[in-house]
Amino acid sequence: MDSSSTSPAGPPPSLVRALRKVLRPVVRVMLSQGITYPYLAELLKNLFVDVAESEFRLDNKPPTDSRVSLMTGVHRKDVSRLRSELQRTTDAVPDVVSLGAALVAVWLGTARYLQEDGSPLPLARFASDGGEQSFESLVAGVNSDIRPRVVLDEWLRLGVVHIDAANRVCLNAEAFVPSEGFDEKAYYFGHNLHDHAAAAASNLLGGKPPFLERSVQYDALSEASIALLARQSTDAAMKALLAVNKNALSLEQADAAHSTPRHRMTFGVYFYAEPVAADADADASLTRPPGATP
């Protein structure tokens, strides 16, 4: 892939329309958090240089400052400065996310922590009460260097778990998505949107084999029907997520015995609904049949 694939006349109008649609909710988030256009412009300048340097190499050699400037439109002096800054930048994962994701994966993927229907088992707080089926044993099995009480207090703060009437620890959701804690939610916002967008971008640019990236779309539904479909989507999605998580945990444990190169994966689902304007509803009915996207 090279910058020469861009037409001198400008990018395809269809791509510009798609980018406006993709960026609209992201701009909404930025405006809600006080991020201005000048701040975003500097962020994009940095990102353009980063992507050009890491993904548009010739013979696996880093491009020169002049080539990065030509590809991106960023001034050569800025390219040199930004490349130096990139070498000092790392993407930090909040500690509660990295540990929490591992704990929830084990909780949802290990038979002794599951009920007969596959849902997460409420766990006794202490090993003295629940033995291996306890929150204390769960944490110790994943990371023996951190006290279970510290994890529990943080999870209670984030809304990941709650304590039931029997003093058991109960997982509030069947996936690790904190209901509180902006930094933790922001991490998943970036992680999930990146991987979804990366799969779609690879498919758009002709990547082989194509990634799974499908959806079902209808635009003439009542509010009651949307609610019904939201419940159905949640039930079906959680079954799929639990099944993939259980298999991935088992495979990762088996792969640990081999020295082959490592890869990461994300399997995600989403549901979204919003009111449809009357004129948009009429236009859509003339241009697109309902159903699954190709």
Image (cartoon, helix red, strand yellow):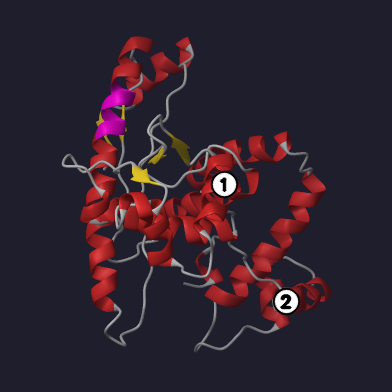
Find residue 69 and report its horizontal and vertical position in percent. Answer: 72, 73
Q: Nearer the viewer, residue 237 or 274?
A: 237
| Residue 83 on the magenta segment | no
SS for tag 1?
helix
Where does the magenta region start and end?
229-235
Between residue 57 and residue 39, name the one nearer to us. 39
Q: Position of residue 279 (x, y in %)?
A: 47, 13
Magenta stretch, main secondary structure, is helix
Position of 174 with respect to 183 (left or right) is: left
Give the distance between the C-alpha atoms of the residues marked 2 and 1, in whole angstroms. Answer: 33 Å
> Would you say the residues marked 2 and 1 are in contact, meaning their CB atoms lie under 8 Å apart?
no
Which amino acid type corresponds to the residue marked 1 in the rendered image?
Asp
Q: Which residue is mark 1?
A: 153
Residue found farthest to the left? 116
Give the class, few, some or many, for how many residues have Cα within 10 Å of label 2's Cα (few <14, many ≥20). Answer: few
Q: Position of residue 150 (x, y in %)?
A: 57, 54
